[in-house]
Amino acid sequence: MEKNYLVELSQMNSSVVARAIANEQRNIGTINNLHLDGIIVSYVLYIAATKKEVCLDSIEQFEKSYPIPLAIKDIIIDNIESVWNIIVELKNKFSAEQLLSFILFNNDLEDNKTMEYSTPNGLLKLATAILNIQKNDEVLELCSGKGNFPLEVYKSEDNFNYTGIELNCTANEIAKIRASLIGKNIRFILNDALEYRSESKADKIFSNYPFMIRTPSMNEHKELLIKSFGFPVDVIQRASSDWVFNATAVSQLKSNGKAVAIMTNGATWNVVDKNIRKYFIENGLIEAVISLPSRIFSSFFIPTTLVVFSNNNKAIKFVDAREICVKELRNNILTDECISEILDLLQNDGDKSITKSIDEFENDEYTLNASHYLEVVPEIKNGIELGSVTKNITRGAQIKATDLDELKSDESTQYKFLALSNISDGMLSIDDQYLKKIPSNIDKFCVKNNSIILSKIGTPEVKTAIVQIEGSTKLLATGNLYIIELDETKINPFYLQAFFASDTGMALLKSICVGSVLPTISLSKLKSLIIPVPPMENQYTIANKYAAKMDEVILLKRNLERSIAKLKHLYDEEAESC
């Protein structure tokens, strides 16, 4: 099949075919798999449209008049009976080009069981451009799904040797049907991508593998990597499935080869994968890391990262492409223009790209998250670590919601509790949050006067507030909160709260948040946060002004609450006097 013709087919709107098949499937109501059955219907109709000798009077006549290719014969024969009525109903209603376009490029009939096997077109284009597959290249795809990747490559290079490995039988069958129509040297193997090993190493590898797999067999896959490819035990034994897939890909790559994989953002920074990230970085196995836009996949919204693997790298290029997309309904799309911008950032450093040498990662816990290095962090001159001006920093009580509910009191007591939701605009609102008592085993989580409360979670922003304890009140901090007990001989609490509430302070706190799904602050990062600590005289000046403004805001809020309450009763009061 000619490359130009394939490009034309990919641009054709075949949704009319998808809708017609879907309508017929609903009428029948006994469909095994929406997409596979739709592909088989279209395949039979396409063959009949392009070969005059093919007869569709019956299934037997079709089989006699057309020698189905051996690679897909069992797939067609096993499924054709269940969709034969649809084939008959749609006979001669679509052109050969419409049918072929649907077979090769349309995934509109995917259901919840199969959607995960399709990689977005924009992501396929980006991966293809990065890999730059050449004539006679040996190409391997781990978790090949329905065969979309080789179709994308085929648009620009039609003379390469491709092997796709897929564990899902239905997806693999669809891929085989597609491959039978586009050309030679493309094969799909039904196998576990973590078990399969190619006879020879590949020039290029692509993998959009399933995320966060936790199965007993994962330990066996790790053992295989240790025995067969020499991965150190301490590096691989705790690694997440993302890095097991990455290691499997790299182990099958030629010395001058290149691989692209899609992974979760969490695996680029979490503690569990620190050792294996260190191994990959220090052994020069990572060429580039691209933070992708959220909602780029239609079946899930987990933020993802594209990683480029190769050998002998002395530095790593980071690209923050989270905003390089076109927003479309519920999803974000990578257009050709977006892809060009990302490719340009891979070549040139700028506001959204940076190059880091291998020896720069040790102090950053071998983090491979692009946004971590590209966030603008204010420079604090002559600053000191937060931990050096505190007596103690601890987490709030990790108490279950059900246990907390049992402790709650409807009556006023000297015991109160504080949760993340009680912090707003740097102030606390805990008027009616009473407890019957505070058990002795969690009494240590009570907040002392003039302590700072800071949220562990950084979304939508880090929350902070200064705590003022009245009389004999005891305040229990719960949930995802840090309790910062300050050394008031070194720092004024109101000064520190004023700093945290400032744009500079918020930017600094945001810079130590790690993670995209749920950005969080680690205790070690918080203690080592560099903050400005001027002479006490200067601190008191800022602290007094902040405290005065805070009192002013509290008063304004109370007046606003009273005014709102009056609005609610204004009509009734005035109506009575009229």
Image: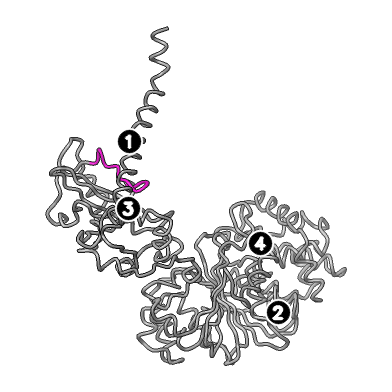
The segment highlighted magenta reads: 423-433
In-image side of 577 versus 56 (left or right): left
Q: State how far apart marks 2 and 1 are (Cα).
A: 81 Å
Q: Earlier in the sequence, mark 4 or mark 3?
A: 4
Which residue position holds label 2?
Answer: 70
Residue 425 colored in magenta in the image: yes
Residue 178 appears in view: yes
Label disc, if present, on residue 542 of the rendered structure: 3
* Distance (Cα) linking label 4 and label 3: 61 Å
Quarter of the image where one finds residue 458: bottom left
Where disc 1 sits, the SS reads helix
Give the residue at mark 4.
Answer: 107
Nearer to me, 422 or 193: 422
558 within the magenta span: no
Can residue 307 be seen? no
Q: Nearer the viewer, mark 2 or mark 1?
A: 1
CB of mark 3 within 8 Å of CB of mark 2?
A: no
Give, as a three-letter code, the residue at label 4. Answer: Asn
* 189 left or right of 503 in image: right
Towards the viewer: 230 or 432 = 432
> Dividing the image into 4 quarters, which one contains the N terminus?
bottom right
Task: Name the residue that disc number 1 marks.
Answer: 555
Q: Secondary structure at mark 2?
A: helix
Label 4 residue SS? loop
- 318, above or below 39, in the image: below
